[in-house]
Image (cartoon, rainbow, N blue to C red):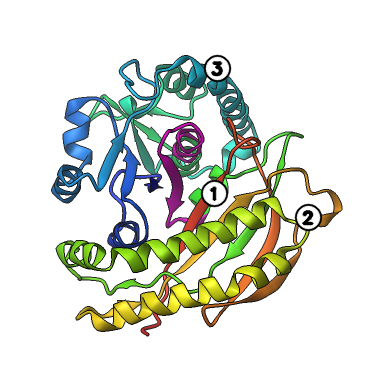
Amino acid sequence: MAVLLYYPLVKPPTEILHQALLYWDGIASIVPQDRREYDVAVPAELHELRERRLYTPLTFGRGDMEELDDPEWRQDRGLSSRVLLEELRRMAAPPTRQQLSFPDAYLYGSKMSLWLERELLSLRLARRYRRHFWSLVVPQEVQQLVIGTLAREIAADRRVSYVPCTDRADAHAWALRPAGADRLPAWELELGKLLPVPVPGTPTADVVAFRERYADERHRLMRALHRMLGDLRRDYEHPADVLAQLRREIDESVENYRAAARSSRMAWVERSVTVTLALAAAAGSVVQPGLTWVLGAVGGYALNVATREIRPLSRARREHDFSYLHRVGETLP
């Protein structure tokens, strides 16, 4: 299974929700464990999708974690926890502290580990929210860094393939922010407008019905895209060759999916998605930060590729590390 893991908030925007239902096995988000907080944070629509096994609420590190509470996870958690702690301490020190937008965001206390809550308070990067004592008031950058890091850590350690996804460029940047000398080279791919979604206002029930009716077309498109991403990660020295080998498969799967979309009664809008893809090994001189070029055409759209460095977390060096940034567009097919 491959599920989109939305962050930094609990409730994903409608467009990302519909994208998850159309191109993935479902959607997930990190929720507070406390029942009072959970009831406030999770809307009725997500409750309904959970009953259909299309939405998964994930909890993290508060002492009541059934799926994450295993020895192997505990062993790997130390690396990302140290990286997060180092970054928070850097943010708490001048001059960075003076640049934070404090306060303008919230964190549910039971959405994170108890040690992390205490650390945020001790660093004066958070304070109790008077109306709801179980919430923390934090700078937006802190919220984005904390939840983005938790999302990547969960994605690196689950039996289900959870792929972090956000619609906020700043949250995406904070979650992948390099820290220290230990950095991981990565591709940053602009997939163009390959993943159309219904126009705003389309009932989610209609999207679910389309998902079920055209399951074969959906699966074929996602298999082609995931194969392309996996091959680019492994064969990073020859990206043009990877695309040349898969162009026909991708073009055909895109056209089949578009035919299914045209046959539906829904109106569609095209959306752009950026994929940050950690490479399988150090790429040396092949990957130069800032390098940008057009790799080729896929499904009639250009595929832009850039290189960057990201902070490795948990098992990122041994397993895939995908991260998606959803961009809003206005083009109707």
Q: Residue 318, relative to residue 309: is it above or below?
A: above
Q: Quadrant of the N terminus?
A: top left
Nearest the eye: 188 or 53: 53
Query: Which residue corresponds to the image point at 53% horizontal and 62% vertical from the top-left?
Result: 274
Q: Position of residue 166 (x, y in %)?
A: 43, 53
Q: Is residue 253 left or right of residue 305?
A: left
Position in image of residue 291 (x %, y %): 76, 64
What residue span does the magenta drawing correspond to? 147-169
Residue ID for mark 3? 75
Is 273 or 143 nearer to us in this picture?
273
Q: Earlier in the sequence, mark 2 or mark 3?
A: 3
Horizontal and vertical percent for residue 74? 50, 17
Mark seen at residue 72: none
Residue 188 position (above or below residue 99): below
User: Which numbered disc, 1 or 3, marks the residue that appears first in the sequence?
Assistant: 3
The answer to which of marks 2 and 1 sits earlier in the sequence is 2
